[in-house]
Image (spheres, grey):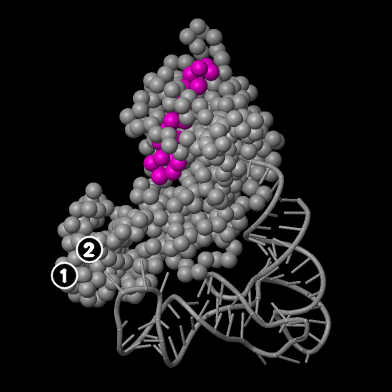
Amino acid sequence: MRLSRYFLPILREAPRDAEIVSHRLMLRAGMIRQEAAGIYAFLPLGHRVLTKVCQIVREEQNRAGAIEMLMPTIQSADLWRESGRYDDYGKEMLRIEDRHEREMLFGPTNEEMITEIFRASVKSYKQLPLNLYHIQWKFRDEVRPRFGVYRSREFLMKDAYSFDLDAEGARHSYNKMFVAYLRTFARMGLKAIPMVADTGPIGGNLSHEFIILASTGESEVFCQNDFLEFDVPAEGVDFDEKTGLQKIVDRWTSLYAATSEKHDAAAFEKIPEPKRLSARGIEVGHIFYFGTKYSEPMKATVSGPNGNVSPVHMGSYGIGPSRLVAAIIEASHDDKGIVWPEAIAPFKVGLMNLKQGDAATDAACEQLYSALTGKGIDVLYDDTDERAGAKFATMDLIGLPWQVTVGPKALAEGKVEIKRRSGGERELVTPEEAINRLSG
RNA sequence: CGGGGCGUAGCGCAGCCCGGUAGCGCAUCUGCUUUGGGAGCAGAGGGUCGCAGGUUCGAAUCCUGCCGCCCCGACCA
């Protein structure tokens, strides 16, 4: 992408009402634009990151056996009356009326709808287990949205729903998502710790929140710091192998870790003092097992091997990709701007022409640009006629993992400079060498 | 939902107390000079001062109501 043809509305100064660093940087880097309280447009750069986050989520969901679909944002009130949640959910649910005065709502979550879809088609245990998910916009009319897309009213959510014949099967489905989540967050460069959590309005009795540690986090969390050294399950992990999977989950739940709602001070005190970690965290995922809470009232039943008809055991599993974008920035930035982990960076390489209009630098940049894009690498080529300093500042702000600088001085020696955004190391190499390095 | 604060150009702000036809920096456009860490000079464009009433000869400024947004707390996938 040529910057001169792109839409990247950089702000030199942060808007006053942006308090936390991720919100400021997202606004300054031209990633988002606020349209109303807690409602944001994702501009091209932000959209690229959001798409990459979703893609990793999707790959790991698929790997764990979940199947993608897409449900609507608008739901009928009748569906929610069946589960009894229409009245329970309160003002957080945005209720709307269509032209025929039918009661509708903008979905805050999809347990009811997926249960309705399931019960219409699945009648036999032979079709189980089943795990269906989608990535769709949700709306929760928060009393107080804040911190940009970190706590917004409209937000993107990946929500998966598992269906099993019995509690034991459901436990395995839960474990699959548990492991998928560990992998998902690790791939984004995050250390996420599963913590025993409250189930809130979703219900149920088995639940973990996945928390990443960040000083700006909203939740107060307590855990044993050994978690930070734990290995994340490898790509080849067998999701169908029950005992192996259970072992992974057991290990990741063997040590104390809880949010403040579930905090047990006495248990925490038993951890040796130097291993106690009391910090703030950001919730980036939440998984629940809630049994027959919805299947029973909504009559989502299947015939078992013995011919008995029983309600299915369900779980639901959420990740907020829009919040994750903010969370990743909270976890990875410096005083100059964002430092994207390579896996979710909007572009891998920022190519800077320090003297636009100079025949030699123009030609070298064009060659690098076409060679890199030809290899399938995402390159943002700053071909504007801004001055060098402005280009450096912009590239540091938007945080692309690699910067390639083409200026007349080094180019006279046949060299260009490559810089790693995260460590800041710079190196002069030939254009060919730069292409080789960046293709790796 | 309680408490506090703020709405003036795309962004950051001044002007408001003490009423007199709206200003600064950045950004944008034009020209010239510059060109390896947010350039300089000269010129230009851009604002129903959140909205609606009221007071006044005259309102960004004073009064009333409304709307929007932010922060703290409570709440929260």
What residue did someone put label 1 on?
A413
Q: Do the residues labelled 2 and 1 touch (CB within 8 Å)?
A: yes
Label 1 Cα neighbours within 10 Å, binned few <14 / some 14-19 / many ≥20:
few
Relative depth, front residue between A64 and A268? A268
What residue did someone put label 2 on?
A428
Rendered view: B22 above or below A353: below
Q: Which residue lies furthest to the top in this view?
A: A306
- Where residue A50 appears, as percent x and y from the top left, is 43, 49
Mark seen at residue A319: none
Q: Is residue A22 in the magenta section?
A: no
- Where residue A135 appears, as percent x and y from the top left, is 46, 41
- Does any portion of residue A95 appear in the rendered image? no
Judged left or right of residue A147, residue B36 is left
Q: What element carries label 2?
A: strand
Q: Is mark 1 on a helix, strand or loop?
A: loop
Q: Is residue A187 in the magenta section?
A: yes
- Amino acid type, residue under disc 1 in the picture: Glu
Rendered view: A339 above or below A311: below
Rendered view: B13 above or below A53: below
Q: What stretch is highlighted in magenta?
A: A165-191
Quadrant in the rendering for residue A207: top right
> Which secondary structure type mostly characterizes the magenta part of the structure?
helix
Please give the name of the residue rendered at 22% of the width and 63% of the height, measured from the top-left corner.
Answer: A428
- Does any portion of residue A377 appear in the rendered image? yes
Judged left or right of residue B49, residue A414 is left
Q: Which residue lies furthest to the front in this view?
A: A273
- Where residue A246 appears, as percent x and y from the top left, is 45, 22
Please give the name of the residue rendered at 63% of the width and 38% of the height, measured from the top-left corner.
Answer: A260
